[in-house]
Each structure stands twice: as structure tokens, then as C-alpha cells.
Amino acid sequence: MAGEVIGINTAIFSTGGGSIGLGFAIPANDAAPVLQQLIKDGHVTRGWLGAQLQDVTPEIAKSLNLKSQEGGLIAEIKKGGPAAKAGLKTGDVVTDIDGQTVNIGTLARLIAARQPGGRVKLGYKRDGQSHEATVTIGKSPEKPDMPPAGTRAAKPKNITMADLGLGVVALDEDLRKSHDIPDSQRGVMVISVAPHSTAAKRGIMVGDFILQVQKVEIDSPAAFAHEIDRLRDQKKNIILILLQSKDGISWVPLTLHQALP
């Protein structure tokens, strides 16, 4: 009413492509540092952690024996990035920054607002234990690295886990050549997904890559089956797999059925 800028529009609600008068905005104070950088430097420099994080869902919290869903679960660590240099690992759950409890949204915003070269203290949980790391913030890359896209073809040799509803195959030399898979690609490739299965319901597709099972790296179908059986013996009901798809890398919870006596 006073003619002051209190918010910056970021999106509108639309059912047909045009505005119906309902918009969404961020506070003007959040946008002010961006405007100042544009005026001073002509471009925006954002802080970079060098880690890809995802929400801690109820299933993920249960699988990792976490008491709450706070923080962000690290799905990928950029080699040589700030998080890697500070000792953080895939599967860690970042819970606070400089003593402030965060979720994945606030964590991303706070890191982006930091100047490269500055330091922050990150609290995180690993294997149920609380830790702290001092991270030197990096500069956000202009073009972030994209993971190799999964292929969508199958090959006969595989191990199939019927209760999960998926089959996997080793990344041998023949498969890499026939599907143009780079030597740097890790894990095993999904070659079958049963309709209406646990895997299908979680969006797993043929051509995706399974990199880890419950934070254990997988390099063969036999290793994949071994870890599944080991977790089944531990009476685990929900397990986590680190999945690489065309959309990126993320932790995916799967319901694990116990073997019949």
C-alpha cells in the first residue's frame, strides 16, 4: 500500500497458460543481495557445496534409523568439490549449518548466499552418529556436470530379484561397447522391471544404474544379490539403493519382503 517492494514474483498459477491473478513471490530482502551483485559485477556468484542432496522421506528416515526427517541426504559428492575435501560422503545426512537446523530448501539457499572462499560448519549424521565438518565454500560452476544418461535396452545375462521386481547386469566390456557406456560409469545396469512391482512403483526404469545398496558400493550382479540377501537376513523392511537415472542420482527406498520359511 505504501508503494514499497516487499516481494519479487517468481511464478504464477495457471490452468491454461495465462495468468489468473495468483502469483508466488520471494521476500524482497532475499532478492536484494542478487540485485546488488548484478549492479556491482554484472553477474551473480553463488556459493557451491559440491554435493547433490535430496529430502529425507519417512521411508529413508526409517531405513537409516533417523529420529526425524530434518536435513538433506547426500546422493552424490562431486569429486574434488568442497564437500569431498571436507570429508563428507554419499549417504551422510546434513542436519545444520553454523548451528542452524536446516531442511534441503533452507540448506540450498544458505549455501548459495555464501561467498566463495568463506567457511561454514556443517553438522551431519553418518551411521547414526553426529559429526561436524568445516567446509570452504566453492564457486558454483557455470555448467554443472550431468551424469551419463541411462540407456533403454536390455541384455540376457542378469540376476533377477523377483520380490523387488528388477533384474540387473554387469557392466562388462561388451555391454559398454554395445550401449556406449563410458568407462567411468559405476554399478550395475537395470535390464528388467516387472510391472506393478516395488521397483516400478518407485520409478526405476530399464537402463538406470544401481550404484550402492544401503551405502555399500555395487560392482556386479552377484554383489547386488549378496547385499540384498544380507539385509534380508537382518530383517530389514526398507532398504535404500543409490540410483542413477536420466534425471540424476538419488537415494530410492524399496520395500524388501522377507524370505518364506
Image: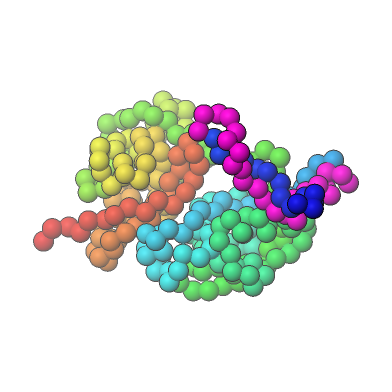
- Image height of 187 relative to 109, above or below: above
Q: Quadrant of the C terminus?
A: bottom left
| Residue 245 location (% of width, % of height) | 45, 39
Pick out the residue farthest to the front. Answer: 1
> Residue farthest to the left?
261
In the rendered structure, the answer to whether residue 142 lies left or right of residue 58 reads right
In the rendering, at what x and y percent does residue 257 appear? 22, 56
Please state if 247 lies on the left or on the right of 235 as rendered: right
Name the residue: 52% across, 29% down.
Answer: 16
Q: Is residue 244 above or below residue 64?
A: above
Residue 26 is situated, as x and y percent measured from the top left of the image, at: 67, 51
Q: Is residue 187 visible?
A: no
Q: Quadrant of residue 240?
A: bottom left
Asked if residue 27 is among those painted magenta in the image, a careful observer would answer yes
Q: Is residue 150 visible?
A: yes
Question: As displayed, is residue 133 above or below residue 224?
Answer: below
**In the image, which residues are magenta?**
15-40
Identify the colour scheme used.
rainbow
Q: Please name the residue shown 59% across and 69% down the image.
A: 101
